[in-house]
Amino acid sequence: MAPEDRCPQCAALADGSSDRCPRCRAALLVPSLAFAAALDAPALQRYIEAYESRVVCAPADGRTWLALGLCRLHMRAFDRAVAAFEKAAECDPGDPDALYYGALARAAGRSPGTIPAAEIERILEDIDAACESGPFDAKYFAAAAAIRADHHQAKGRAVPDPSAEELLGEALRGRAEPGEIRRLLEFLPVRDARIRNALREMSGEGVEAAPLNPRRDPSRSRRIQEWFDVPKPVFPWLVAGAATVIALMAVATWIRERPTATAWLRNMAIVLGGGGLAGYVWQRRRYRRRPDAEEMMQWFREDFDAVQARAAAAVGLDPRAMRGEPAGLLGLVRANQALAAGLDETTHRSVADNGNPPFLHPYWDCLVLVFGPDRLILHRALYNWHRHVVLNDRIDEYFYQHVVSVKTVTESSLAEDGKAEERARYFVLSFASGERTRLQVMDRGVRPFNEAEMIALADQAVERIRAVIQSTGLIGPRS
């Protein structure tokens, strides 16, 4: 009996009329990477052994080569998976799954931005071919968008048509198997926060959040939450006015010797006025029990230290190989940026101590500069101070000689007295590829308590980058 006639799981005879075993109902061919990921190790091994025997007897069976490639890809045997997918493509030219999964196997779990240009062009060629050969599958378009965003746009290279935005739109409009999108993120990890967040939404995982270590004391978290959740109380003038009017009406009825109406109005005035006043007093006590702004800022500095420590650990450099300590910068996050990151606008409520600027913000745009032996590593993330987690973190690396300029830039406007007034300030880091990192550290309209500290951090970062580059002996930034 030929091995292709038997079920890989129970060895029962397969009649060829169905894709499932007539006895155990197991799939005869692994149909997708998500399916392979759901198998336990023994079942996966049985499939691999069955397919390896089968392709010896039927080397032109493209479907079996494809199923074997999926099993090998899940096992992270990338070279052997590529060989299997190439055989599948030879047997069934134009098969979009063979092209797509073969591209994932070539990526070998690397981010598109770290794959050499020659390799990424072959990967992109196969994925684009899968998109064109159809039938439509959202995962093909999602992968094509990820490569364009991470390898082309992020590095300032010409983006082949169609753009990453167009491809992502196609992926979002179509139906996607969540498990397949999760495998895409696993085998082609995307650094671009916008693309990654969109794919996580497609996979059903939602906005990415990474907890920080050490974890924050729960009591401190509650106190920080109180700052943003407890609004400044407003005296209930309307309620007090209504209670006063009712009290005057009670007096009028008393003068007219109408005791029943008088009692009813008097009680209403007491309940309305007393309840409103009691609520105001309770809210005012809650507001006064909040931590003061100085204590909040001290907590924030300690929490930001954890963000910097996580960034330094994430880049994977030996601390002994670094050129000094990492430098952290803080930027402002607008409500529309929070929405773009998949956050609820109501959670981005900045709160002031007395109703006027300066403010404390719940989200921060954090940039940590890590100085490697030959390159500058940028770790950027959105920091949720409420929950003490980072979202959408991204790592980029640049050789020091590719840094063109580093500076702070101010935007000014004319004040009423005719003098120039600083309106905004940015930290700007430019590279030879045309890429630019820009972080807003000051905005006249949303000034935070630590504005001076944010500006100082940006100025210090400028000096640190210049000093480190000069110490390497390489060509330093021009400005």
Image: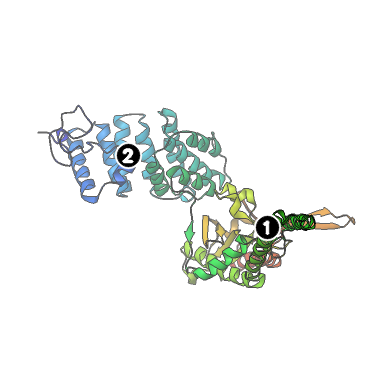
Asked if residue 76 is positioned above or below residue 387 in the image, the reply reads: above
> From the image, which quarter does the C terminus lie in?
bottom right
Residue shown at 36% from the left, 40% from the top: 102
- Name the kind of residue labelled 2 in the image: Ser
Mark 2: which secondary structure? Answer: loop
Classify residue 139 as left or right of residue 296: left
> From the image, which quarter does the N terminus lie in?
top left
- Judged from this view, the residue extending furthest toward the right is 417
The picture places residue 182, in percent across and down from the top left corner, at 40, 46
- Name the kind of residue labelled 1 in the image: Leu
Residue shown at 39% from the left, 39% from the top: 177
Q: Is residue 434 visible?
A: no
**Picture colour scheme:** rainbow
**Residue tagged by mark 1?**
272
Indicate which disc, 2 or 1, sits on the residue closer to the N terminus.
2
**Residue 100 versus residue 412: which sits nearer the camera?**
412
Residue 129 image-quadrant placement: top left
**Residue 389 versus residue 85: which sits nearer the camera?**
389
Asked if residue 196 is positioned above or below residue 303 in the image, the reply reads: above
How far separated are the C-alphas under marks 2 and 1?
A: 66 Å
The picture places residue 68, in percent across and down from the top left corner, at 26, 40
Classify residue 25 as left or right of residue 436: left
**Residue tagged by mark 2?**
32
- Judged from this view, the residue extending furthest toward the top is 17
Mark 1: which secondary structure? Answer: helix
